Image (cartoon, grey):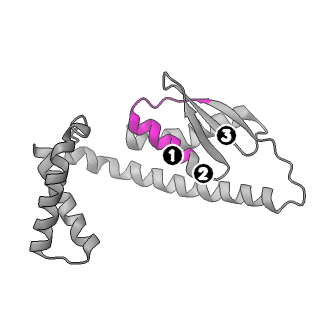
Amino acid sequence: MKKLFVYSIDLGIVWCFVSGNISIINFLFGAIISYLLLRPLRALYDNITDDSLEVLILKIPSLMRYFMKLAIEILKASIAVAKIIIQPTINIKPGIISVPIRAKTDLGITTLSNTITLTPGTLTVDVSDDRSILYVHCIDIDDADEIRESIREELEDYVLEAFE
């Protein structure tokens, strides 16, 4: 019940900004509507853990490191893909590799998968049934072990620190 109230307050604030009318009446309207919409759907978010404010504040530096690393990796991969495209003859070896992962939570696996997909030249295709391996399509596979290690060291460490 406490979560539902907090979500309604948050969504009431979001409603004010989305509608462009910041007033008490508009906030109350957004909060009441969100409460009425969230009430029947509460089974979907009842299993979300309640992190204390202190835990969330402590995660801010690791989240900032993650987003900085993500931006750097997107920039590096964009340059690599641009080099491939600019060449007069395209000499690439596309393929799918398996990448063992350490992430265990749904949030960690989803974030890692989306991070890989956001990086140009790579796309997460599937997750194994036991959730220990990601299958990643790469535009150019020169050394599969190097790509696996890059994903684990360059991306997964930051995801684990920020989201698990």
Q: Marks 2/3: CA distance?
A: 11 Å
Q: Position of residue 76 (x, y in %)?
A: 66, 56
Type of the residue with mark 2: Thr
Q: Position of residue 92 (x, y in %)?
A: 82, 46
Q: Residue at x 54, y 43 (%)?
A: 155
Which residue is under mark 1? 114
Position of the N terminus, as image quadrant, is: top left
Residue situated furthest top in the rendering: 130
Q: Earlier in the sequence, mark 2 or mark 3?
A: 2
Frontmost residue, 27 versus 151: 27
- Rendered position, 109 above or below 19: above
Q: Is residue 10 left or right of residue 18?
A: left
Q: Is residue 157 magenta?
A: no
Q: Is residue 114 left or right of residue 145?
A: left
Q: Marks 1/3: CA distance?
A: 13 Å
Type of the residue with mark 3: His
Which residue is under mark 2? 119
Q: Residue at x 50, y 39 (%)?
A: 157
Q: Earlier in the sequence, mark 1 or mark 2?
A: 1
Q: Secondary structure at mark 3?
A: strand
Which residue is under mark 3? 137
Q: Which residues are magenta?
A: 99-116
Query: How many residues crowd around disc 2 within 10 Å: few (fewer than 14), some, or many (20 or more)?
Result: some
